[in-house]
Image: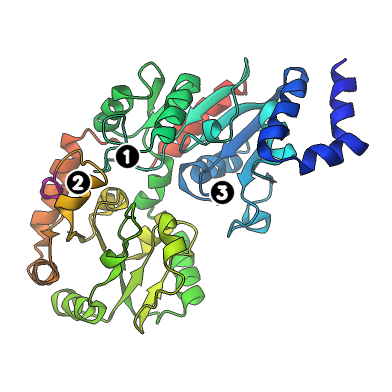
Amino acid sequence: MYTFLVAVFEQGFFATIIKNLDKGVKWLVLRIVRPFVKIDPKKIMFINFTGNYDCNPKYICQQVLDEKIDAHIVWSIYKNTRTGPQFFPRGVKCVIRNTYNFYREMMSAHIIVDNGIGTSFVGYPKKRGQILIETWHGSLGIKKFGVDSNRDKKWIRMAYREGRMTDYIISNSDMEDDIYREDFWKKTTIWKYGHARNDILFTEDQARLGAIRRELFDAYEIPMNAQLCMYAPTFRDDGDLSPYTIDYARLSDALTERFGGKWVILTRFHSRTKKYIKSYTLPKNVYNVSGYPDIQELMVVIDAGITDYSSWICEYMLRRKPGFTFATDVQNYANHQRELFFPLSALPFPTAADEDTLISNILSFDNEQYVAECDAFLKEKGSIDDGHAAERIANEIRVLLGK
């Protein structure tokens, strides 16, 4: 019966119809097949909200491949993703999201690895026998995303649904444990193993670091002797681009005066601002690295970082390299867009609400004090990242696969 039903919907005339149906109708059809699709005990399905080979799923996937765990790996991409199948490592099968093949792969996956409630957003109800692992996509972030602070009601509904389905969620700190328990993952088993994507921030493999540096510098034609500062603010709900308006030349001069060397600025637009920046022009000698697929790799290359409320700076802290926060709209942002877990001043980074203060903070930067404050902050939040998270997670996956 199983073979017959699946064959009917996957061959010839029916297959052509199904593959051209819109997402909603397609899922109604797939519900007929779903109960009869067997779970492949070796299959791992990765649902990454960017569709790219990045974030926690990338580093978990890579560890599974490196350890040669016997698994069938499938990755969900978007039709127009910037990193198509040719950018994925050998052994990873890519399927386009919301297609028939995408749902077919999900139906047969033993383990689903998600990094942002994507399983709920594609309308997939987990089957008995399937395991959902939520990795999340930030750590020690300052922005709240829970029920009391998130104005996106659809997102809230999807998060509750994801929470009910999730078997394991990965944390890197006591702070994250508390955040997960507060709203959506009250009963989910927490794996406090650290975030796999942060492992690279601890690497001492000079060959690997050199290769990443060469790839970045070659891709954007950056002078090889330059020191790099990345300025990467988060998005605003109203599409406001004023955070990207900064005197880049003055910033570069201040970095040179304080730290020496020749500095260039990298700007990285948040993925949710792309529709607003088509006509946005950056000054000469400022490099737009928004298209670089992996921000973690950027973090191991840059020599200083600046943001406003984005959580990446809290991961960058793990390198103990100079970091700064610059936010001119704190009151408006906290009151009308995103509530904050704590004020910017609670972070170890010198904080500025205007450009003059930012420049002053750079010129007076005290590295010894900064490192001490980073250490204290990470200890207070109960951070456990140590460069071995992917190993711990891959070991659990090995157990779940029965290897």
- Separation of marks 3 and 1 at Cα, in angstroms: 25 Å
Residue drawn at (32%, 24%) of the image: 183
User: Horizontal placement of 303 versus 86: left or right?
Assistant: left
Residue on which disc 1 sits: 385
Residue on which disc 2 sits: 334
- Separation of marks 2 and 3 at Cα, in angstroms: 29 Å
* Nearest to the observer: residue 279 or residue 376: 279
Q: Secondary structure at mark 2?
A: helix
* Circle 1 or circle 2, nearest the eye: 2
Q: Amino acid at mark 2?
A: Ala
User: Horizontal placement of 196 versus 118: left or right?
Assistant: left
Residue on which disc 3 sits: 51
Q: Amino acid at mark 3?
A: Gly
Residue drawn at (29%, 35%) of the image: 384
Q: Which color scheme does this rendered protein use? A: rainbow
User: Horizontal placement of 384 versus 214: left or right?
Assistant: left
* Nearest to the observer: residue 394 or residue 136: 136
- Is residue 209 visible in this depiction of the protein? no
Residue 330 inside the magenta-drawn segment:
no
Residue lying furthest right: 12
Q: Secondary structure at mark 1?
A: loop
Q: Which comes sooner in the sequence, label 3 or label 1?
A: 3
* Circle 3 or circle 1, nearest the eye: 3
CB within 8 Å, label 3 to label 1: no
Q: Give, as a single range, the part of the protein colored magenta.
A: 343-348
